[in-house]
């Protein structure tokens, strides 16, 4: 059920709106200011569109477009005018919002950042994209893990960005930390449509978790983004899906975190988020709780190495015009804290 897109909201429901925002071209500070105003306008539209809406979600690249431009003049900061405008929009419209910025990083390449701001204008979640879409994207890899917050009406809420969702470990980590709803914002273009759909569904089903996912939409004259706003229930079924490809359409649905909690407690068959750490509990008390996965233990030891590693052709961004990096990744102090 989705409460007719949230029109019939239950006492335990959370109504989400996914904005299939028109893909912009942003090259100058004036462009950045204009696109900020556009997002503020669409936040107000979301509130007018549905009085029951609790959370409006904008795609990755909503502010900057898909150019991958790292020009310092159009990078953002947390105390800059763009974030201030988003905070004010949430206050004025009494709504939670999820926004995307490219944040200046004095120590390296910019961060691809997702923000969740509450209806009082406070930043409740700050997330740096952990898996930039290499070799195309130049962003610094995120260094703060996957935060989970208490969202509207007490739901447990997390956010990942675009390519993050192609790694099942990301959704599993969000669920393991308690997320009942996981947002996935993206700038994906049409060739990714099928993998976008089945990963959104599998991320939901494998973790008994609602996933709410949205891409940019329309064309900027070079790229064609697909929209594809999609809300998947914890059983993997799609309860809302923007298939029209219409730019600026807002896809809505009511989701039920209370039913997520109920399933996680009461399901026996296919309670995979629990069973993963309790293998074969019918045969052995409590199930096996070891870690038999070589890739996990190798990664934790800093020894991740594929059998075909030496044969991989693309290992930096030089094919897309980026100089091969020489700097080694070191998590920042503030992220670690």
Image (spheres, rainbow, N blue to C red):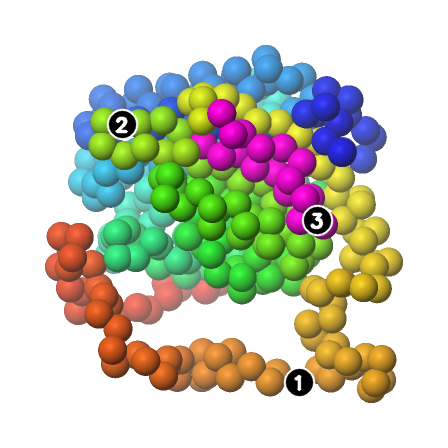
What is the secondary structure assignment of the residue under circle 1? loop
Identify the residue shown where x is 57% and y is 57%.
171
Is 212 rendered above or below residue 280?
above
The residue to which callout 1 is attached is 290
Q: Quadrant of residue 80?
A: top left
Label 2 environment density (alpha carbons within 10 Å; few <14, some 14–19, many ≥20): some
Query: Is the residue under label 2 in contact with that under label 1 (CB below 8 Å)?
Result: no
The residue to which callout 3 is attached is 234
Indicate which disc, 3 or 2, sits on the residue closer to the N terminus.
2
Considering every residue shown, the one lying at the far top of the view is 48
Left or right side of 214 for 136: left
Identify the residue shown where x is 52% and y is 16%.
44
Q: What's the distance in space between the residues labelled 3 and 2, CA to CA?
A: 34 Å
> What's the magenta region?
227-244
Q: Nearer the viewer, mark 1 or mark 2?
A: 2
Q: How far across and down, in percent of the image, does residue 178 sit?
A: 68, 56
What is the secondary structure assignment of the residue under circle 2? loop
Q: How far across and down, in percent of the image, does residue 220 sit?
A: 27, 27
What label sits on residue 81 in the rendered view? Answer: none
In depth, the one of 95 and 179 nearer the eye is 179
Give the number of marks.
Answer: 3
Identify the residue shown where x is 33% and y is 50%.
111
Indicate which disc, 3 or 1, sits on the residue closer to the N terminus.
3
Is 19 rendered above or below residue 325?
above
Query: Is the residue under label 2 in contact with that under label 3 (CB below 8 Å)?
Result: no
Q: How far across and down, in percent of the image, does residue 303 sit?
A: 39, 84
The residue to which callout 2 is attached is 220
Q: What's the distance in space between the residues labelled 1 and 2, CA to CA?
A: 50 Å
């Amino acid at each position: 059920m989705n409460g007719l897109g949230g029109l019939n909201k239950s006492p335990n429901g959370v109504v989400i709106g996914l904005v299939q925002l028109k893909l912009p071209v942003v090259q100058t500070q004036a462009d950045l200011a204009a696109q900020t105003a556009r997002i503020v306008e669409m936040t107000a539209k979301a509130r007018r569109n549905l009085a029951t809406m609790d959370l409006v979600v904008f795609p990755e690249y909503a502010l900057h477009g898909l150019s991958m431009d790292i020009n310092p003049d159009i990078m953002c900061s947390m105390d800059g005018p763009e974030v201030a405008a988003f905070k004010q929009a949430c206050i004025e419209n009494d709504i939670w919002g999820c926004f995307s910025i490219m944040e200046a990083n004095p120590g390296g390449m910019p961060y691809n950042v997702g923000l969740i701001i509450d209806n009082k204008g406070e930043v409740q979640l700050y997330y740096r994209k952990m898996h930039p879409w290499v070799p195309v994207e130049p962003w610094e890899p995120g260094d703060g893990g996957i935060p989970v917050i208490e969202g509207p009406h007490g739901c447990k809420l997390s956010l990942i960005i675009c390519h993050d969702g192609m790694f099942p470990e990301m959704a599993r980590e969000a669920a393991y930390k308690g997320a009942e709803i996981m947002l996935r914002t993206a700038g994906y273009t049409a060739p990714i449509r099928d993998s976008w759909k089945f990963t959104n569904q599998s991320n939901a089903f494998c973790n008994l978790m609602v996933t709410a996912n949205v891409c940019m939409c329309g064309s900027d004259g070079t790229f064609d983004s697909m929209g594809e706003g999609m809300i998947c229930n914890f059983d993997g079924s799609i309860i809302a899906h923007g298939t029209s490809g219409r730019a600026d359409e807002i896809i809505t649905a009511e989701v039920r975190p209370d039913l997520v909690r109920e399933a996680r407690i009461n399901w026996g068959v296919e309670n995979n988020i629990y069973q993963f750490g309790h293998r074969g509990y019918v045969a052995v008390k409590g199930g096996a709780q070891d870690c038999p996965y070589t890739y996990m233990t190798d990664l934790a030891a800093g020894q991740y190495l594929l059998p075909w590693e030496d044969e991989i052709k693309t290992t930096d961004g030089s094919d897309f015009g980026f100089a091969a990096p020489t700097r080694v990744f070191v998590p920042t102090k503030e992220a670690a804290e």
